[in-house]
Image: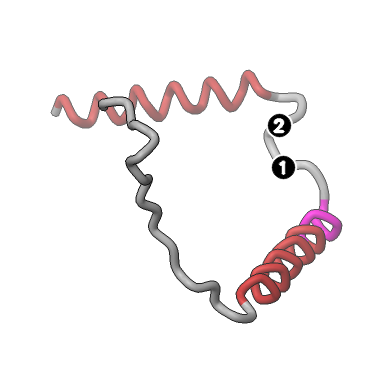
Amino acid sequence: MTPQTEDETIQELKHDTVPGYPKAFLIACGVMIAYLAIILLTSPGPAKGHHGDEKDHHAEDSHSTHDAEESKSH
């Protein structure tokens, strides 16, 4: 890009604002935040498999991967 001199003007794309858009945007954000809060507050507890027996899950995953690779070779 070449440097601009003082007599050159920068073109800027503009459009008219849409009436009511900021209000609708804030309402939509409020609804989304309320929905997320309800989901998080009413969830039954931690996800299964994240506490305690992690080694068993990794062992099952490796067996299923091995079985898939074995079935592809036949």
Residue 50, percent from left and from top: 71, 31
Q: Is residue 52 above or below residue 26?
A: above
Q: Residues within 10 Å of mark 2 (few under 14, many from 20)?
A: few
State the SS at label 2: loop
Question: Is the Cβ of the residue at disc 2 closer than 8 Å to that at disc 1?
Answer: yes
Residue at 81% across / 59% down in the picture? 37
Residue 61, percent from left and from top: 48, 27
Residue 44, percent from left and from top: 82, 54
User: Which portion, as a residue range, is magenta?
Assistant: 39-44
Residue 70 location, quadrant: top left
**Kind of residue indicated by mark 2:** His
Give the position of the C terminus as an image quadrant: top left
State the SS at label 1: loop
- Mark identifier at residue 50: 2
Q: Which residue is at the far right? A: 41
Q: Is 11 colored magenta in this rendering? A: no
Q: Which residue is at the far bottom? A: 19
- Mark identifier at residue 47: 1
Residue nearest the observer in this picture, 30 or 38: 30
Q: Is residue 37 above or below residue 7?
A: below
**Kind of residue indicated by mark 1:** Ala
